[in-house]
Image: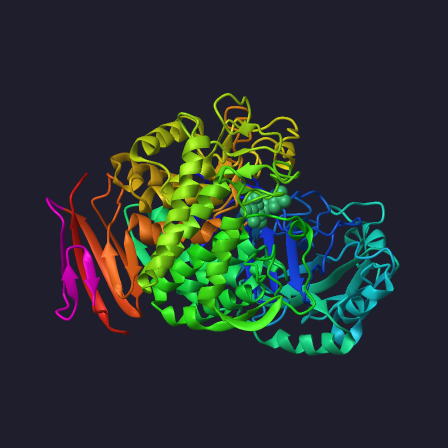
Amino acid sequence: SDGVNRSQDEIHLHSPLSMPNATGYLWNKKMMFQMTCRGFANALHMQPEPAKYAYGQSFEAKTFLQPEHHYYAGHPGRFFYIKLNNGSLFSLPYEPTRQKLDKFTFIQKQDALRWEVEKDNLRFLLEVKLAEDIALEDWRLELINLGDQDTYIDIYPCFSIGYASWMNQSARFIPQLNGVMAEYITPYQKAEDYPKIKASMDKTVLIADAPIESYDTSTPQFLGEGHMHCPDAIMQSTLFNSSALYETPIAVLQHKISVPASQKVKLSWLFGPCKNEAHAMQLKNRLSKHNTARPAHINSGISIETPDNTLNQMVNTWLPRQLSYHIESDRLTTDPQTRNFLQDHLSSIWLHPKLAKKNLLLALSQQNKNGAMPDGILLHKDAELKYINQVPHSDHNVWLFPFVELYLNETNDYSILAETLAFSDDKKPYSVEEHLERACEYLWSQRDHRNLSLIKQGDWCDPMNMVGIRGKGVSFWLSLASAYAMGIWAKILGTIQQHEKAQKWQDAQQTLNDACNDLGWDGNWYARGITDGDEKFGIAKDKEGQIFLNPQSWAILSGAASQDKTEKILTAVEAKLKTPYGYCMLAPAYTQMDERIGRVTQKFPGTAENGSIYNHAASFYAYALYTQEPARTLTKSKDIAYEVLASMLVSAHDCLKRGQLPNFIPNYFRGAYHQLPEAAGRSSHLFNTGTCAWFYRSIIEGLFGLQQHSGKLTLQPNLPSTWESASISKKIYNANVRINIKRGKQFTLSTDANNLNVKGNEVSGFVENQTYLITLVVPHD
Ligand code: CEZ
């Protein structure tokens, strides 16, 4: 067995060794907290820019959340050394002593991470939750003496604070706080940065409820001649009571506890950033109550029952959590990439439609009057475009259209199109409809003489930065994505009776599709682009980067791919991109810099955009296969689409190889299966990903085939051929609808409600807050 148990609401891992990097995560609106089963931790809080309150032991570069985070002995963590009076020393959860424990269970709960550990007749129940409203970790330990002898124990919570500043860092014990406070000055050089520094919470506290025997706050003094697995201070009867005077801070406390036979003892601690001593004293008051972070279960209004239990658990429990994390945290940035913002908030449309509307309007308020969307959406008055958002990308406008389409379909709130708001460079109010019209016009204007879309320094693929650096290179993916966007806009215009405009965009869509068919079709699949130097790539004659998944998916979405071409695409993707761990984004992975293409070719083969199983791209493929003609009508499409989705989920048979728990969908698994099979399948452990919304959408609109439009629900399920039945419950126009699907001779649709109108596979007349049961019989293909 893989040592993992899954229940409806929890995931249990029974060894710290089988998947050392397996992590659980928690978040609230102010912070994100990720911890490995062994005790290493990553935490970020927003103030308003992302900041840390516990660092590594040497100076760290500031960056965004990275995949395949590197853990090492000495990595920041939350540890508890345990010393028994028989001299035995070990640590919880497992690091840093790495002593064998009699029993070990790491549990991802909905609102907590928990460890249940046994050693030497003692049971330790350790749990962390986050405060609901602020950045604060709330730690609880319950200690149970399973033996028949009274036991005396030294417990040393040891929380890394690390090297926070080369300018100024220190830490000290504060008796009235019953804890440790570290102080540091975020390093800076420009005087104009001082106001920001001044406002930031440059302090970290560890506060205990139990009496403290001794403490250490200086890492070098705590370690002495030892290391984290056997620090000198822990080897003494008491700690050294050190202060950190421009030394790397750490917070270690000693509690002397006696636990009578068969009795239990409870201890608690708080850990997090704070402003000053007075603020720390306020935090201390929270020790008495348990700060439940959030309702135990996030209700998305959608649940499924299918023969695939891994899928059920992901869709019903873990995905809503991941969707919710994205919409509440905006990936811990104040300038989310426009494409990420618009895709992450697809989830708001299901979970929180008012937030979805607010965010669409926010994004459009930052649009230029020429129609161009900015590279990032600023969420805070002082926010600025950083990192990748300083590189001009060409695709941001595209993402408005799937967003608006889903919003209108789910809410039927067409009044949004008449709302008015200014452009960033024109204070006059314009309707949302006008904003969207200009967004389309902008996409249309960014073509070259061949009717192909200019890529600039990247499209959806961020690091494809040199294809168009001289202003000539084009992207077939972007051309197809623009066509798809125009097609959506044409449909919306049709619905609001703007037939002339609708026709214009349909024609534009056709023009782009035709250009891609003329110049991009390589015989068995679509090419990825044409470089500044007029060289086509992503084609059969390329040795590396021969085929890319995205142009195939979007040729289906845009309607460019005919039935015949779609058949060929499916065959090529199965042959060239499919691996036992999922579908790669490109293959073969690049092994050296291709200066015609750029940075993507320099990433390690099989990681991220260079040929990993990039789940975001795979989710586009599944969505395309399920929802678009002619792909949908091909018998094998349904099974392939299901396989694409199922292979993104960590399951019992490949958990160990992926090294991840089934508590989220990561942004990628290692690809390059034929080139580097030993690493293939490994999870990136990064749960920031556009995948989750498109995965959810693929299940709802694709697998279950629930398509909402103008008050109607059309049912076109695409169950995998081996399934005999499945059901889904979902809010449809605010009514509670359950749909049971089973196999039978011929298609029938029936309902228990006589006030619903049924016409073929179309149902309408839903009344808010009513409950409906719909039964569908679908034949085998
Ligand atoms: O970041 C993501 C971006 O957030 O890569 C996607 C892109 O669509 C998302 O907007 C595909 O390129 O190399 C880079 O600079 C990339 O920006 C990566 O950091 C990439 C990471 O894989 C993080 O998910």
Question: Residue at the spot x=59%, y=67% of the render?
Answer: 266
- What is the total number of numbered labels drawn onto the structure image? 0
Residue 131 shows in the view: yes
Give the image location of residue 210, x and y in percent: 68, 70
Direction left: furthest residue: 745
Picture quarter with the N terminus: top left
Give the image location of residue 668, x and y in percent: 52, 41
Among the 4 quarters of the image, the one containing residue 737:
bottom left
Q: Nearer the viewer, residue 389 or 106?
A: 389
522 up-or-down from 116: above or below: above
Q: Nearer the viewer, residue 374 or 207?
A: 374
Question: What is the image's colouring?
Answer: rainbow
Question: Residue at the spot x=61%, y=76% of the render?
Answer: 288
Picture quarter with the C terminus: top left
The segment highlighted magenta reads 744-764
Q: Nearer the viewer, residue 118 or 196?
A: 196
Question: Residue at the spot x=62%, y=40% of the render?
Answer: 463
Give the image location of residue 553, x and y in percent: 41, 40
| 755 falls in the magenta region | yes
Q: Nearer the viewer, residue 74 or 192?
A: 192
Residue 106 shows in the view: no
| 436 falls in the magenta region | no
Give the image location of residue 78, x and y in percent: 66, 56
Taking the image as shown, residue 546 lies to the left or right of residue 717, namely: right
Among the 4 quarters of the image, the one containing residue 175:
bottom right
